[in-house]
Image (cartoon, rainbow, N blue to C red):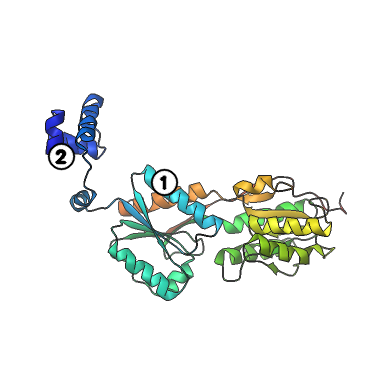
Amino acid sequence: MADVARLAGVSAQTVSRVSNGYPGVTEETRRQVLAAMKELGYRPNSAARALKRGEFRTIGVITFSLSTTGNVRTLEAIANSAAHEGYAVTLLPVAVPTQDEVRGAFTRLEELAVDAVIVIMEVHLLDAATVQLPPHVQVVVVDSDAGDRYTVVDTDQHGGTRAAVRHLLDLGHRTVWHLAGPEDSFAAQRRTDAWRAALTEAGRELPPLVRGDWSAESGYRAGLELAAREDCTAVFAANDQMALGLLRALHEYGRRVPEDVSVVGFDDIPEASSFLPPLTTLHQDFAEVGRLCVRAVLRKMRQEGPERGTTLVPARLVLRESTAPPPAVR
């Protein structure tokens, strides 16, 4: 830093202000300092900076699965939002949802230089692992079922599902079948519970539940079962990939979408508008979830926000060509 100061003709304090992005430096001086840094190959020492400030400007992210659309897009949004705030992200994947794996992730966390942690994992895994959070590390959980024990940010799974069911009922369908996600997923369970509640409140019959595993292949297998049911005129699929498999099964069985069967998905993946027909689905604003997660951990670090509380980002119904009134109504 002293070498840079001599070359730029400024004080070491001015070099420090420029390297740390602080205000109060003229643009001409800033250019001189940056040119001197480049010429000398100067890079700020992050370890020394962390010792001086008492922070590492790094956020840890613990997640169970990188194979699901929601987790990957949430992680991407967190990384982008953290970078915008001048923070790096350290990923700690958990291979399988066991107590030992979750506990191991937090053990590794204690060895890493992170200021805060965002957990993209259903909270029952944290509770089951009886983990001890590292001291002074702030935690935010992406799971709307976490209750008041944590600071929580997530998509409004319940509200989005109710909007999907209500849309299909308003079109004139007598009831709505549900292609659910796997039993061990709390997100799938919340969508199933909301589907049941919406039909019960409307006084409609609850059809038998059909279950997949989030994959298009499982949606296809379940779709063959649903396609054989003449009384099935509307299906709410718990994610877009299963909806894609369902569309294929209905097509092969000779049942047209949406003329014979209406289909609604969940997630609004980028390819949803290119399905045949384009898929009506629930749009999850993963970018907003990621932004709010980063904002929440930074506020906790700065002691500006509450220790607990839940923020839900609405899921927006996107209407496309896969839904229509049932044949009896037309």
Going by the image, does 268 lie left or right of 35?
right
**In percent of the image, x 50 and y 59: which residue is there?**
66
Q: Earlier in the sequence, mark 2 or mark 1?
A: 2
| Closer to the camera in the image, 299 or 52 | 52
Going by the image, does 77 lie left or right of 251?
left
Give percent across and percent down for residue 284: 57, 51
**In percent of the image, x 21 and y 39: which residue is there?**
42
Quickly name the residue at label 1.
81
Q: Amino acid at mark 2?
A: Met
Going by the image, does 254 lie left or right of 151?
right
Give percent across and percent down for residue 18: 23, 35
Q: Amino acid at mark 1?
A: Ser
In space, the residues marked 2 and 1 are separated at their CA atoms by 30 Å
Circle 1: is it few (<14), some (14-19), or many (20+) Cα within 10 Å?
Answer: many
| Closer to the camera in the image, 240 or 286 | 240
Camera sees residue 25: no
Q: Where is 118 relative to 80, above or below?
A: below
Give percent across and percent down for residue 271: 63, 47
Give percent across and percent down for residue 44: 22, 43
Judged from the image, the secondary structure of the residue bearing numbered disc 1 is helix
Judged from the image, the secondary structure of the residue bearing numbered disc 2 is loop
Quickly name the residue at label 2.
1
Residue extending farthest top: 28
Going by the image, does 167 lie left or right of 153?
right
Q: Where is 6 relative to 194, above or below?
A: above
**In percent of the image, x 60 and y 71: which residue is there?**
183
Determine which quarter of the picture holds residue 178: bottom right
